[in-house]
Image: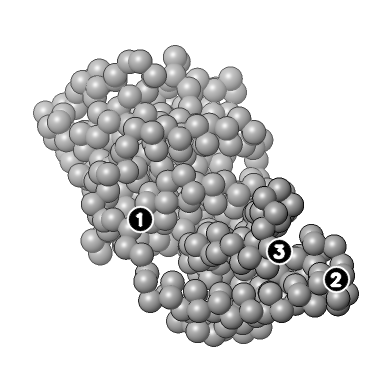
Amino acid sequence: MALSDLIIVLCEPDEHYLVSDLPPLKEDSVTLLFSLVIPTYNEIQNIEKIVEILTTILDSFIPNSYELIIVDDDSPDRTWEVAQHLMLYYPQLRVMRRERERGLSSAVVRGWQAARGEILGVIDGDLQHPPETLIKLLKEIDNGADLAVASRHIEDGGVSNWSLMRRVLSRGAQLLGLLILPDVLGRVSDPMSGYFLVRRSAIANCYMNPTGYKILLEVLGRGNVHQVAEVGYVFQERQEGESKVTWKQYVEYITHLLRLRSRGRIGRLQRRFQPPITRFLRFALVGLSGVFVDMFVFYLLSDPTKLGWGLTRSKAIAAEIAIINNFLWNDLWTFGDLSRKQRGWQQRFKRFIKFNIICLAGLVLNILILNLLFNVFGLNRYLANLIAIAAVTVWNFWVNLKLGWRVTEI
């Protein structure tokens, strides 16, 4: 394999690391079908088990056509030493010990630089990513996908025992990403996934500047990815070792999004976002019916000649009644094709809860705009309410399209 077939990577803010910085492959090296990188840090309790499981699965599916590459960030628990010992029993295993670099994303790229596979992949070393999902991902690549992502947010996907706070943080980070980089994050249902496969050709000769844990953002934002496929999986709870997710990772995630945005890499995407006009028109018509419901209830509650309640309380109640109206029509008509794939009252209730949560952000914005226009600029209360409703319509449609009608099993 020629060195130019490998990716060019930027691991530090001001220094380029080319693939030629690594020892070149021997001339008699055999090109493999698949190279799977396992980034590790203090995973001594899990490393032997994951190597055994992955070997068993891949030996039965693509024997002698793969390699496992452990990239360890000089773990204090000496994970790298145990991994090196395993090489005696697993000839397809390779180990890299990094003494001066840190970070999951850059570890993945370093592993890809040394890889010999036509397909490159990444999986966590803590067994939270079910290894058996690899077979489904490989099949999607074989069917023509450039990128196959394991997703928690499609059918057969989910999380096991996450706390409410962790779920909120995960979804909030995804929503923020959709606002900052809609053309990138909008291509997949789980842009924060750390479990995926990509064709080498899709990222060959691409500059990458990975930060934190979210290497998928780099692949989507800077790679030449045309066809994307997704496979559902259930994120498992860690059995051994300690979680490495901290507030620092969320800060790095936001910084990463802003950096991708500011450098204009989005234009490299080959498949541009095409607005679903028909669906939006339906959503708008349903929203119009909600306007009448909202305005009528708002009039009954807030008008001095009626109940005369306070502005904010009246608006909140009117908006929730309108949300119920809009959900029923959207579930039946606007997103009816998606709803029919998720039958049953339990699934409908999940969609309703999601719809409410998404609209809640719009409701907060709606109330702020209403108070600003009415109390500060002195507009008529009904005109101010109408403007506030219009301002959040696009928000509600876009986020519901991407998240609201994606119902997971768990």
| Amino acid marked by disc 2 | Pro
| Amino acid marked by disc 1 | Ala
Towards the viewer: 159 or 340: 340
Which numbered disc flags the more N-terminal residue, 3 or 2? 2
Towards the viewer: 192 or 48: 192
Q: Is residue 277 visible?
A: yes
Mark sitting on residue 148 = 1
Left or right relative to 240: residue 255: left
**From the viewer's perspective, is residue 197 above or below residue 403?**
above
Towards the viewer: 347 or 356: 356
Inter-mark Cα distance, 2 to 1: 58 Å
Quadrant location, the C terminus? bottom right
- Residue 162, horizontal then vertical, whole percent: 68, 53
Inter-mark Cα distance, 3 to 2: 12 Å
Left or right relative to 202: residue 245: right
Which structural element holds mark 2? loop
* Quarter holding residue 315: bottom right
- Say which residue label 2 marks: 304
Which numbered disc flags the more N-terminal residue, 2 or 1? 1
- Say which residue label 3 marks: 381
Inter-mark Cα distance, 3 to 1: 50 Å
Left or right relative to 93: residue 347: right
- Residue 323, horizontal then vertical, whole percent: 66, 73
Query: Residue, x 87% and y 67% (percent of image)?
Result: 309
Q: What colour-coding does the image apply?
A: one colour
Q: Is residue 327 visible?
A: no
CB within 8 Å, label 2 to label 1: no
- Residue 1, horizontal then vertical, whole percent: 14, 35
- Residue 81, horizontal then vertical, whole percent: 49, 23
| Amino acid marked by disc 3 | Arg
